[in-house]
Amino acid sequence: MSTELSSELSPQYDAAATEPAIYARWLEHGVFTAHAERSARVGGDRPPFTIVIPPPNVTAVLHMGHGLNNSVQDVLIRWRRMAGDEALWVPGTDHAGIATQNVVERQVAEEGLTRFDLGREAFVARTEQFVETTGGAILKQLEAIGASCDWSRTAYTLSPELSRAVRTAFVRLFEDGLIYRGHRVIHWCPRCLTSLSDEEAEFEETTGALYHIAYPVAGEPGREVVVATTRPETMLGDVAVAVHPADERYRDLVGRRVVLPIVGIEIPVIADEYTDPAFGTGVVKITPAHDANDFEVGARHALPMPVVIDARGDMGEGPDAAGRVPPELAGVDRFTARDRIVAMLRERGALRDVAPHQHAVRHCYRCDTVVEPRLSDQWFVKMAPLARPALEAVRERRIRIVPERWEAVYVNWLENIRDWNISRQLWWGHRVPVWYCEACGGAAFASVDDVDDCPRCGGPVRQDSDVLDTWFSSWLWPLSTLGWPDERAIDLRAFYPTDVLVTAPEILFFWVARMIMAGLYFARREPFHTVYLHGTVRDMQHRKMSKSLGNGIDPLDVVARYGADALRWTVIAGLGLGTDVMLDPANLEQSFAPGRNFITKLWNIGRYLLSNIGAESVRPLRDIPPAALTRADEWILHRLDAAIEECDAALGPARPTGAAWSESELRRGMRLDDYAETARRFVWNELADWYVETTKPRMSADGEDRDVARAVLVHVFDGALRLLHPIVPFVTETLWQRLPGRAEGELLARASWPVRRASEGGAAERGERAGPAEAFEHVRDAIVAIRRIRSEYNIAPGQRVEGAIRASTPRVAAIVREEAPLIERLTRTAVEVVDRSPAGPVAHEILERDRSELYLVLAGAVDVERECERQRRELSELERQLEGLAKRLANEQFTSRAKPEVVEAERRKHRDWSARREQLVQKVRALCGD
RNA sequence: GGUCGCGUAGCUCAGCUGGUUAGAGCGCUGGUCUCACAUACCAGAGGUCCGGGGUUCGAGUCCCUGCGCGACCACCA
């Protein structure tokens, strides 16, 4: 990039060639690097503004979901950076236990091996190497979409620093009694060969069958009970059948025994409230080792818990299975076993019924295998004590969730929180920092540092072989990336708590809620004040984009074709609060047209500006005497102020003013689509469509006025580029570099966010300026009216016509008269202002006869008679409403019972409307002549 | 089964505490190569605000109900 003043801009903007160079320039100038010492929290003069990235899996490749998520974060970060905050966006990756291990296992499988063939150490080494060579590619890809992350702070959940944070957290929870070893039924993935947390075992609606099986009552030939089950194969592990204690039908059976078909052993009939008498036959089989509920029942009744299905999901061969699993079923896959058992039952006449059954079955969130409930020993975190403060943080508005409706989901989950299974039978991850002494057999202990000898007896120790759930490192992310557990770390002091967390609702429980718990528990502060949950990128059929459906869009492909700006603009402008973004993978052209077209528009405004300014320097706006400004100048400056104000309102406030969000702040801000739309409307519909057009004649005439137009144009375009930079950083930076007066090393990326010009002056000055700005609206209205009539009467653009305008007031007449040249230029209609002219319909008649003459009647905008009618209708409508309002205010019941502020609001409304009526009455009188 | 949400133009959605003529983008129709831009410009068409009832001077907005759809949670075998 050169900063030399150039009057030429290529006719087409070449994003692919420009963007990488601009990005390199930002890096070179260290624009993205945050300086902790500048944070007001450590004595600096800037409020910190921090976002931690939702770390993508280290082996992931960029997809549209990332594109959306990171565009949002970058908009916020760039906005705050320009607004003067010390902005920090922490990037990084997640080691992603199961996901990464699965990838490497697949590689190993291609060599005909399993991870067990390699052995733990070799497998982990191989995974490390794999991550080293191919991992983190996604971070490079984020650069392509313009992410302004502070790469000097890139973090990784399995790095030595973050591993230390993980161990410290584990040890603290362990010593506080919040981590315990539990023996119970958990979700087990027979393919990944590991346990899963409740959140990792996802429900999927499935149509299965409900099998009714007869269990003969022992010692009472001919009598039987029928149980219903969706999983007949688990019957091999049955230890009882249960009925409800109050169920009359089976009362006499309680305490008796029934014969378990196929296995042929006797099991007791027990009474337990868990049984629902209304479901099926009211008798339920109890398989404690393979069903979480049955486990509870089994525990209550001190029943044995034989395991009949092994870790791989095959019918077991272990000691428990002996005598229960028939030899012909041993080692058979659970689903095959189901079919065989059903066949065996049918053969023996024990199958009473098979009915289709709709139910939700849990699947592994990583490989989609049907989860097998399995009795095992796992590490759990006691969640209730952690959940309570997390609930309070949201209830007390120290954290807000946007959009608000997710708050209920959050609260609901936390109120019904269940303990978190954090151990995984994997090899890739943080190994559980618990050691067992082989010699003295004392209690297991946790340690931050590796342990070689038993601290009690000095004997040899053995570390727990499990690893921790990936999310056990992710939940520390806002802390660990900033230096925790070192409480004195400057980043931690300067940037924690962070500000906004941007993510998708899918990981509200997995990640967001747990981060809040961790922040409050380990650092006594909530980790952020805003959770922004955005929608999902979907195709035109509203399907989630996915590899398997082949309906994905590769963001890098979009960047290559239309540029990162086009991608960013399209997703940000299309992102209503909490709504999904629909894109058509089959038609990228159309999907990204809004972004591409808008960027082209910006580019062309830049071309116009530069071709009219050339290498000459331009006076700063503040050196232009206010009296020299034209109506159009005043108008566009006024519109810029309005745009700035609206953008600020759509985006902010950036943080709560107090310790918690106030009621009035709560629902404001984070409307990125409103911000984008406001900026777009300003640039396109106001700056380009109107202001630029008005400057054309001024540019071709020499003299003072040309300089004024140039000064205003540069000022306004500069403001527009600043306003748009967070969304489309590349093209705005490129254009901004070319504006007159740029010094070497000056970058838009760290220029200041625009402020309203009006706010610099006093209130009186603001009011004074509103006049000329409003006057231009009359000119605009006149032009639109003339164009419409020309279009209605099909007058060819080349054909000049004469028009007469009758204005509603002398003031409007004066404005139109003065601006006649401009009106003529923009409508190709010579206009004349007359005091008396034929009224609208008459004018049209003349027009029909002779198109060389066009009579227009202007009253604000349109023909006087229609306008008169319109105003009359409006007045009568207003009067009707006013009457109703008066009625309400006169109503004793209303004024005494309603809240005082409501009554006050109604009174105010009445006053406003009355004033409005006065205005209308005046207008109608002037317009209609009565 | 529980909780929450949604149904407004052909499509995707805005419409705050009820109040003038219900908006935007895309798409569509007609007209223009006007010296920054046809990836553009100008003009326009298009809505019984899901159905029914109620509250109100006034309902897209509040209440009830019916229909349709979605999300999250959940141990009904």
Image: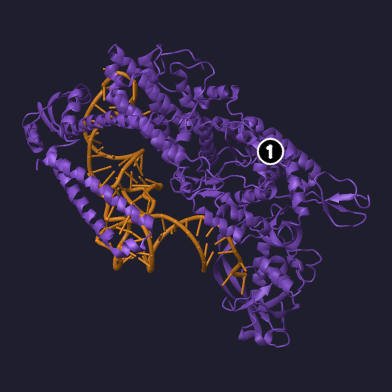
Chain colours: A purple, B orange
Place of residue A234 in the rendered image (x, y in percent of width and height, measured from the top left): 69, 68
Left or right of B48 on screen, residue A352 = right
Q: Amino acid at mark 1?
A: Tyr
- In the rendered view, tell whether residue A343 sits above or below residue A381: below
Quarter of the picture containing the C terminus of chain A is: top left
Front in this rendered view, residue A499 or A69: A499
Left or right of A749 on screen, residue A177 = right
- In the rendered view, tell whether residue A145 sits above or below residue A738: below
Q: Chain of mark 1?
A: A
Front in this rendered view, residue A562 or A769: A769
**Residue ID at (6%, 32%):** A846
Q: Which quarter of the figure has residue A107?
A: top right
- In the rendered view, tell whether residue B74 sits above or below residue A735: below
Place of residue A10 in the rendered image (x, y in percent of width and height, measured from the top left): 42, 18
Left or right of A171 on screen, residue A781 = left
- In the rendered view, tell whether residue A213 sits above or below residue B59: below
**Residue ID at (60%, 76%):** A276
Place of residue A792 in the rendered image (x, y in percent of width and height, measured from the top left): 17, 35
Helix, strand or loop under label 1: strand
Q: Which quarter of the figure has residue A263?
A: bottom right
Place of residue B52 in the rendered image (x, y in percent of width and height, measured from the top left): 29, 66
**Residue ID at (77%, 50%):** A171
Please tell me how crowded label 1 is: few (under 14), some (14-19), or many (20+) other residues with Cα within 10 Å. Answer: many
Q: Using the rendered image of the protein, determine whether residue A607 is visible from the camera's viewpoint.
A: no
Left or right of A748 on screen, residue A29 = right
Circle 1 residue: A156
Q: Using the rendered image of the protein, determine whether residue A255 is visible from the camera's viewpoint.
A: yes
Q: How many marks?
A: 1
Front in this rendered view, residue A607 or A529: A529
